[in-house]
Amino acid sequence: MHDISALIAQLEALHNHVCPRQILGIRMGILAAEMLDLDLPQKNKRLYAFVETDGCFADGVMVATGCSLGHRTMHLMDYGKVAATFVDTKTGRAVRIAPNALSRERAAALMPDAKSRWHAQLEAYQTMPCEDLLQAREVALTVSLEALISRPGVRVTCSHCGEEILNEREMIVAGEVVCQSCAGNSYWSDGTSALIAHAEEAGTAS
């Protein structure tokens, strides 16, 4: 049995309060390890987690599993869902876990004297049987885990902006190595045109 109270104490060191979503993250991580027959928290990088929303839920997954952005064993798929897919990188097995559709109603029934539905969820989620709280199934990835993880020590320099690119995230535009921002796939702008736009204009002009 995993000591959920000890994991909650770790969360309290990260947040000024603990919420139901954090408990869901903890319970999902524990269930994933049981389904994949892995020990937690992991001491290597065998378990990889795709979390489908950020915030406190992701921290719950992190403290339960040891998966994190810092260790490059967690990836955000920003679907706005309190759900996660866990992958055994050694065997390739993957399980996706999400809350049971009836988990909130069941929590309210278990804790009728709670101050609010939120407090009922906070308490009940810690002890509810997995089959009442969560739904889980084996899945197959449609993205390349090897490409996401990449290889250690791989780095190149963007020929346009001169910034370093890690983890094989570079692109080739007009025969040049460029970063994704300079290739036009940027989430920010400083008012200058992207390299790919210049390449397209040059092609049109010729």
Image: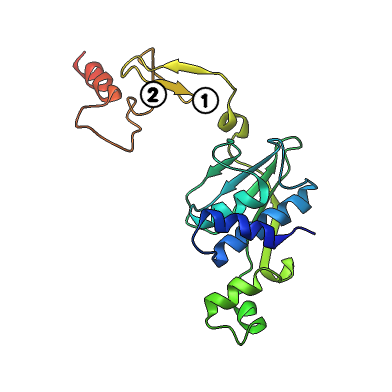
User: Residue under circle 1?
Assistant: 167
Name which residue type carries label 1: Asn
Q: Is residue 126 above or below residue 29?
A: below
User: Residue under circle 2?
Assistant: 179
Q: Secondary structure at mark 2?
A: loop
Instruction: Count neighbours of disc 2 (C-alpha within 10 A) and say few if under 14, some if 14 to 19, many if 20 or more.
Output: many
Query: Where's the C terminus, which quadrant?
Result: top left
Q: Residue at x 33, y 38 (%)?
A: 187
Q: Secondary structure at mark 1?
A: loop
Q: Residue at x 80, y 47 (%)?
A: 37
Q: Residue at x 65, y 78 (%)?
A: 106
User: Which corner quadrant of the image does residue 101 belong to?
Assistant: bottom right
Q: In this rendering, does residue 83 appear at all?
A: no
User: Which corner quadrant of the image does residue 49 belong to?
Assistant: top right
The one of 199 and 7 positioned closer to us in this rendering: 7
Q: Residue 112 placed where, x, y %?
A: 62, 87
Q: Residue at x 29, y 37 (%)?
A: 188
Q: In this rendering, does residue 205 appear at all?
A: yes
Disc number for residue 111? none
The one of 184 and 43 positioned closer to us in this rendering: 43
Instruction: Count neighbours of disc 1 (C-alpha within 10 A) and say few if under 14, some if 14 to 19, many if 20 or more.
Output: some
